[in-house]
Image (spheres, rainbow, N blue to C red):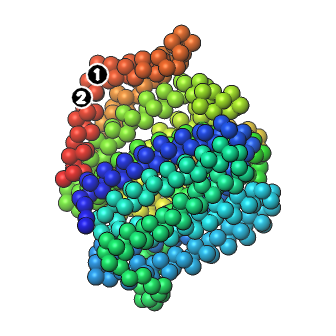
Amino acid sequence: MSYTVAQNTYFLTLASIAQKAVSFVYFTVIARLIGVENTGVYFFAIAFTTIFTVVADFGLGPVLTREAARYPDRAERYLNTVFTIKLFFGLGSYVAVVVLVNLLSYPDFTKTLIYLSGITMFFDNLHSAFYSFLRARKNLTFEATGIVGSQLITLIIGSLALYFKLPLYWLILAYTIPSGLNVIYSGLCAHFTYKLSYRLILDRPIVKLFLALAVPFALAGIVSRFYAYSDSLLMSKLLTEKELGYWSVPYKITFAFQFIPSALVAGVYPAMSELFVKDPKRLAELFLRSWRYLLTIILPLSFGLVAVASPVIIKLYRPDYLPSVPVLRTLMISLIFTFLSMLIGATLNATNQQKRQTGLLTMALVINLIMNIFLLPRYGIMGAAVAAVVSNIILCSVGLYLVIKYLSLPLGRLARSAWSVLYPAVLMAVAVYYLLDLLGVYLAIPFGFLLYTGLLFLNGNLNKDILGMLRLKTKVVN
């Protein structure tokens, strides 16, 4: 049983959207009900162990997918070996979590939450082995179902815990329990669909080969994960739990939208890889269309949320979280460059420049760390937001320079595409901001959408954007 690239992209995109939506609703309910300080502790416990997930995986997931797809007759032995390696790496990562959290002298309650979250990390690492195998067989339906099902179980357990006012650690168990069930589910799906026989083995030639192949993936994954969560780690030692709670809300809001570039990248990356070999000129055209597509979405989204940040925070999270408003506005500007950097990174990877991409991420991580060390003690969470903007701008700018160089992209066309979407988005945001008191947020937002759409239509870009999206879809399907 296998599916086309377009079908698999469709399945996983829908699952990702559903997961992000349910996860966002779940976090919003938690933040409203447990208070700012408890939200900070809860957010940090999950963030801390999330970093170690990539250490436990060590890049073995994508290597298993690639090698099992190339050599289907060896896929079962590959899976058994990788699962065994992941078992040991997962245990090692959990021990590292326990040791580090004690060395850093966190409060006992925070330690307990991190220990539980570490078990979730362990299970996530194991079920990813089965899903990597299923990806090699071009069957992503089970993974899509598992993603949505796990999130729904989390929502149910977490909601019951909140309703019955159970201890905070139940909100972590709401992730641990479905993650454990996901190991069983994914293993059974692979077993019954492909008649697999499971054994714990360490085939030495396979171990050596896979670990060598996994190093670039592991380095890229570890660097990118540290880049995403290093600020939260520093905050846990330099700021209070309450400030972490204020930070968690805008962070979660911006994170919720990252399925948009992820879906685009998942769709165009195979086409980019193919065109790099067959037709570099068409690769440049595909990048330009993807660039326009992302800008058309992210600019109004970003500037729009900057305009309505205050009522959004108050209505979704209560006035207790008002200190999050300036941070949300700053991170929404940063999100523009995050979106573009994901497209740029995929393009560099597709053109065999993955080492440069890892180098860029490392550079951005170092800049972000240095800025946070200096800014956090002085400016608190706003310092972290500024550090995120600066490091993302640098990551995006240097990456774009390399893409322009490798693909011989016309800089003027890139700039015109950006400007033709930028000024309608800015005008829309200004109008919405000043109309909030007159119309209210529920009328101001639709008005802003109509204004933005009308401005795109007047400058002739609306038809281009629609055609560009249709061409992208056609390209992915073909």
Q: Number of labelled discs?
A: 2
Classify 229 as above or below 250.
below
Residue at the disc numbered 1: 457
Task: Out of 195 and 76, give the one closest to the viewer.
Answer: 195
Q: Earlier in the sequence, mark 2 or mark 1?
A: 1
Image location (x, y in percent) of residue 160: 62, 47
Say left or right for 219 vs 372. Answer: left
The N terminus lies in which quarter of the figure? bottom left
Q: Name the residue located 49 percent from the left edge and 50 percent from the top edge.
A: 152
Could you tell me which secondary element the residue under label 1 belongs to?
helix
Image location (x, y in percent) of residue 196: 35, 79
Say left or right for 380 vs 172. Answer: right
Q: CA distance from mark 2 to mark 1?
A: 7 Å
Q: Residues within 10 Å of mark 2 (few under 14, many from 20)?
A: few
Q: Residues within 10 Å of mark 1 (few under 14, many from 20)?
A: some
Residue at the disc numbered 2: 463
Is the residue under label 1 in contact with that under label 2 (CB below 8 Å)?
A: yes
Place residue 357 in its image quadrant.
bottom left
Task: Out of 68 and 454, give the one closest to the viewer.
Answer: 68
Residue type at mark 2 is Asn
Task: Out of 126 and 382, give the one closest to the viewer.
Answer: 126
Say left or right for 195 vs 390. Answer: left
Residue type at mark 1 is Phe
Image location (x, y in percent) of residue 465: 28, 33
Could you tell me which secondary element the residue under label 2 belongs to?
helix
Place residue 351 in its image quadrant.
bottom left
Evaluate whether residue 408 shows in this view.
no
Image location (x, y in percent) of residue 253: 55, 39
Task: Out of 9 and 460, give the one closest to the viewer.
Answer: 9
In the picture as drawn, the residue positioned furthest to the front comes out as: 164
Q: Name the residue located 33 percent from the left edge and 37 percent from the top edge.
A: 292
Q: Name the residue located 55 percent from the left edge and 48 percent from the top edge.
A: 155
